[in-house]
Image (cartoon, rainbow, N blue to C red):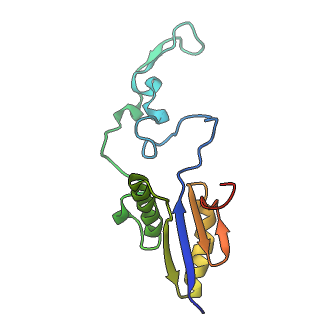
Amino acid sequence: MANVEVKIIYNGPIVDEIRNGMEIARYFNPDNSYVDSPVFTDGYANEGQVGDKGTYGKSIYATNVDGWGSCPGLLPMASANGKLAQYERAVYAAKAAEEAGSENTGITFEITTYEDEIYWNQIAPNMVEQGFYTKVGDNEYGTDPGSEGA
């Protein structure tokens, strides 16, 4: 197999215009998860409503303690496997380009096995929604910020 070039550019996450609710797990959004909403952390007055017409106190979810548990994502790099860390490198490249006021050209590297080519062609479509453009050989996933109309 000939060497295949892989290019990754981080464009920033694709954000829905309408958000339909809060995250349930606070690991993904520590300051704004559903379980951190006042009804869970402070309790709720049920006076005059259906049911027992009483009140209830804090939920078990109110025992969340910052710093307990984690959900390793892309950053920091030490938490990702070697291949996934390439996406982290693209995030760092985007940040460096922004700070330098230059064009974000992402990162480029070569792969030499068909197993790697299969891997990158499988993971790349799943990273589009996270804001990544990936080109594996002639296959493109996402929007190249340098292309017309981007």
Residue 106 placement (x, y as % from top left): 49, 65
Q: Which quarter shows the C terminus? A: bottom right
Out of 64 and 9, give the one closest to the viewer.
9
Considering every residue shown, the one lying at the far bottom of the view is: 1
Q: Nearer the viewer, residue 132 or 27?
A: 132
- Farthest residue toward the right? 149
Whole-percent x, y for residue 77 in the image: 37, 63
46 relative position to 148: left or right:
left
Tell me where residue 4 appears, x and y as whole percent.
58, 83
Identify the residue shown where x is 47% and y is 23%: 39
Q: Total label count?
A: 0
Decide: is 30 above or below 115.
above
> Which of the two residues, 5 or 58, is positioned nearer the viewer here?
5
In this orientation, which residue lies closer to the viewer: 141 or 97?
Answer: 97
66, above or below 101, in the image: above
**Residue 114 in the image: above or below residue 119:** below
The quadrant holding residue 129 is: bottom right
Relative to residue 27, is residue 135 drawn left or right? right
Residue at position x 35%, y 37% from top? 64
Residue at figure coordinates x 51%, y 40% from the top left: 24
Quadrant the N terminus occupies: bottom right
Residue 149 left/right relative to 100: right
Counting from the top left corner in percent of width and height, residue 97 is at 43, 58
